[in-house]
Image: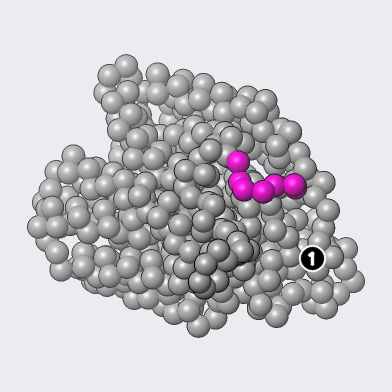
Amino acid sequence: MSIAALRRSARATVSGFPGGFWWLWLSTLVNRTGAFVLTFLSLYLTQELGHSAWFAGLVVALHGLGGVVGSPLGGSLTDRWGRRPTMVAMHLAAAGCAALLAFVTSAWGVALVVLLMGVAMQAVRPAINAAIADLVPAAEVRRAYALNYWALNLGFAIAAIGGGAAALLGYHTLFLIDAAATVLCALIVFLRLPETRPEAATTPSTGKGSGKPRAESEVGIGTVLRDAPFRTLVTLNLLVCLVFTAPWIGLPLTMTAKGLDPSAYGVVIAVNGVVIVAFQLLVNRITDKRSPVMLLTVSSLLFAAGTGATALAGNSVAFAATVVVWTIGEMVHVPTNAAATARLAPEHARGRYQGVMGMSWSVAGFVAPVLAGWIVDGPGPVILWIACALIGAVAAVGYQTRLRSVLADADDDPKDPKAPKDPRDLRDPKDDIRGDGTGESADTGSRKGEGAPEPRAAVVATADATV
């Protein structure tokens, strides 16, 4: 492929988005570039404060537990307060927790701060995902989530490298830098990102004052959980998340049991970040416009194959190859799942839907490390990887049999007249990019004919998931 062709491909991958999206993208990059707490938390607890590895694992699990609360909380606030207020408030809360860690040294004080930090960090995710769905035309939502996920991993890679060098300044300094970066992220959102929450329809007034917004009166977390197709999507995502999280605990234990030096794990797991940063945009290009059910099925099978093959690996190269396989699954799954969530969510309840989906990531982040450690110590590593392969295969079958008809119309969704054409079909994409920053949604993303609705371990405990 020529240089000119590569440039055209890259331009098509990143063009066609409104200005508000790119400010949100920048805030994600800034936030993750300064994300030192999770990266170095276990080392800080064991080397600086002298706690046991067991206690360090408990504290990391508490961060995931905080996310179980934070995701639905953030989803509710996103729909009630708005996207921008929720992001600003939760970013500032996370910054405050990071700053506190520089001064709190008692064991349970640190544990409490990390728990609250987990709540704040996960509460912001639904607001980010809902804002992307508001800003970007429905046909381009998956590509937008993929670009935001790339920014998250690019920032994480920078943080891991820069933090390693900056650790010479001391862990307290790193935590303060983390707090400063998160405050800067909040400022970018506050100053440059428009509020994108759609206007809620109102019910007729039955007494004094105006009618109550229908979005608030009819949609709660319970309502979201009663949405059968979405509940299926969340359940299948939970299965995939369990498989995705297992290597972050089971892989180092497996490699050590094979007689490999602990430093080999650092090199092998670094492959994950390198592959994402280097190839996410290419994967976006290949998977663009593909069927969401097909992508979710393929990604589940890649997770199954990558983790299952870990049982057969015996050296660092083989282990690195397995990481490459499930990392490709990660690059396909994360943005596709976020886009499917936006697709199923009614416009006025996007925050709550994204919050419930984010909760599945947090539950996996809390449960998988415990189960993986128990299986490795008991039945053994081989059983862990066989179980991961089976769970991934079950998820793939579930996507094909339970969600094919539900998500099929995502491929045939008629474009809104206000939505821009595919930038690759335009002679001059700049003329058609919606850069007015109004945040007006080009597509509601809701289902037709519908009334009330039916982002790692220590270093990636948020996945961070959850996008």
x and y, in percent, of residue 460 in the image: 40, 50
Vertical order, 462 against 247 (above or below): below
Q: How is the image coloured?
A: one colour
Q: Residue 238 versus residue 392: which sits nearer the camera? A: 238
x and y, in percent, of residue 450 in the image: 70, 47
- Residue located beneath label 1 in the image: 419
* Quarter residue 119 falls in: bottom left
Side of 239 relative to 201 (left or right)? left
Side of 114 relative to 289 (left or right)? left
The residue positioned 33% from the left and 29% from the top of the image is: 371
The residue positioned 34% from the left and 29% from the top of the image is: 372
x and y, in percent, of residue 451 in the image: 67, 48
Identify the secondary structure beneath mark 1.
Answer: loop
Q: Residue 40 versus residue 367: which sits nearer the camera? A: 367
x and y, in percent, of residue 125 in the image: 47, 58
Vertical order, 8 against 217 (above or below): below
Q: Is residue 403 visible?
A: yes
Q: Residue furthest front?
A: 207
Main secondary structure type of the part rendered in magenta: loop
Q: Residue 435 versus residue 305: which sits nearer the camera? A: 435
Q: Is residue 303 magenta?
A: no
Q: Which residues are magenta?
A: 448-455
Q: Residue 139 versus residue 447: which sits nearer the camera? A: 447
The residue positioned 22% from the left and 43% from the top of the image is: 58
Q: Is residue 244 visible?
A: no
Q: Residue furthest bottom?
A: 191
Side of 25 relative to 319 (left or right)? right
Classify the position of the N terminus by image quarter: bottom right
Q: Amino acid at mark 1?
A: Ala
Neighbor class of circle 1 (other Cα within 10 Å; few <14, some 14-19, many 20+) is some
